[in-house]
Image (tube, helix red, strand yellow):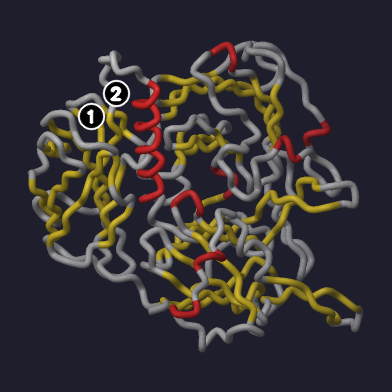
Amino acid sequence: MKKNFILILSFVLLAIGACSSDDEVALPNAVAFASTSINLSAETTPIEIKFASPTASAGSLTLTVTETAVANGTDFSTTPAVAANTVVVPFEKNVSSVSFSFKKLKEAIEGEVKNVVFTISSVTINSVISDNKSVQVNFNETASLGNALAPGVGGPTQPNQVFVDLSSGKMTAVPRVSWDLGFASGTDFRVVINNTVKMSAKQTTSTNIDEVQAEDATMLINNGQGSTTQIDDPAGDITKTAIAAISATDSENKVYLINLGSNPSATNPAVGSEGTAGGSSRGWKKVRILRSGNDYKVQYADIAATTHDEITVTKNAAYNFTFLSLLDKKVVSVEPQKAQWDITFTSFTNTTSFGTGLLPYNFADFVLNNVKGGAKAYQVLTTAFTYDAFTLANVDNTKFTDDQRNIGSNWRGTTGGTDANGNPVSLFVARSDRFFVVKDPAGNVYKVRFTAGVNAAGERGNPTFQYAILK
């Protein structure tokens, strides 16, 4: 957060330096929350909002309020008070920050998700609302000390993506085929494709959504086939999506051909194998995405259609993305709120080398960390530290990176074995020579080790893991 404000302040100072002494145009200030997530540890907590430079005059900020499993006046109160789902926070001239008080009236129990999201909607003085325009106030006073969990991905076809919140132990399972596009909630206008089903996207030269398109076999992702330019950056860099940033100029937003990828296999594969993408094709669509104020306008249709459907997708600052199903023609719920999950179990479109450079490749039994929500991870080999002996003092913060694949497929592998007939087979194993360090969006740090990836019958898609908070 401090880094963000240094950048904001640098921008403001640079703009001031670029103006002549005779320039009387008032430059906008920048305003943002000091933190994007707060775990309540006291009955009353001050929530700080910062300005990049001292305020030119007195004024007020208006905050919108979004409640999850709580009610104003019953579970919490604020000073100034909430009225009509808003809080108006006054500030004086020549101040660099302002705060309001949040009072917790009821506790949450472990595993219970209760929070309030405050979002800056307007400022009475000339200001720019920066990226950190929302803060999520979580009622879970203390994070879970640890647990042993079994995410329900659904067996060897792994039809579910499971999001895990380590601080509460809560797991959220969502069918991987329930969504197609994710629309970023930040200031950038970026759209991601479903990276769990071998989906790809290719820009056309057309801006006419009603122009007939044709299937493109080169977009299919199979062993040794596909293009890295047609998938989102596997590391999770939001500036490197297959669909270009959505321009404010409509004529710059092209139609995209979308290969919707593959369904999970309809039947279970042989024991020890996976069927995450062995099912039928999910088909093809064409889409064109425009801006609609601060939201997205999506035009979409079957590729042979000469008419189209249209839907507005609204940004929601409490989430990393708002998700759309092109097949069901509606906005759908996928990820939990951005500060309410840390890792997810899924299949995933990563890249691998086939001897001629990197190509897209479907990985089963993959684990991503919520890098966009602020969760980071790194690997520790047991030759350096044992899991039991590893403490908070051993954490190396320089090893946390912005790559969402830092757990990835590193937690599992294969080993030689034989089947019931004595034939050699490769057996799936959870690696015991390593564990992982995960820092959640609230700053809690955990050690995580994976204990299995198969059930007693050897069927994949049955992961288990354990974790403990580091203190």
Figure quadrant of the C terminus:
bottom left
Helix, strand or loop status at disc 2: loop
The type of residue carrying mark 2 is Leu
Residue shown at 66% from the left, 16% from the top: 305
Image side of residue 1 versus residue 177, left or right: left
Q: Secondary structure at mark 1?
A: strand
For label 1, the crowd category at 10 Å Cα-Cα, with few meaning under 14, some 14 to 19 and many 20 or more, is some
**Residue 9 drawn at (x, y percent):** 35, 38
Q: CA distance from mark 1 to mark 2?
A: 17 Å
Q: Is residue 1 left or right of residue 48?
A: right
Q: Position of residue 265 (x, y in %)?
A: 72, 52
| Residue at the spot 68% in from the left edge and 67% down from the top edge | 410
Front residue (pair 276, 90) = 90
Q: Which residue is more in the foreground, 158 or 68?
A: 68
> Residue 27's mark?
2
Residue 244 drawn at (x, y percent): 61, 28
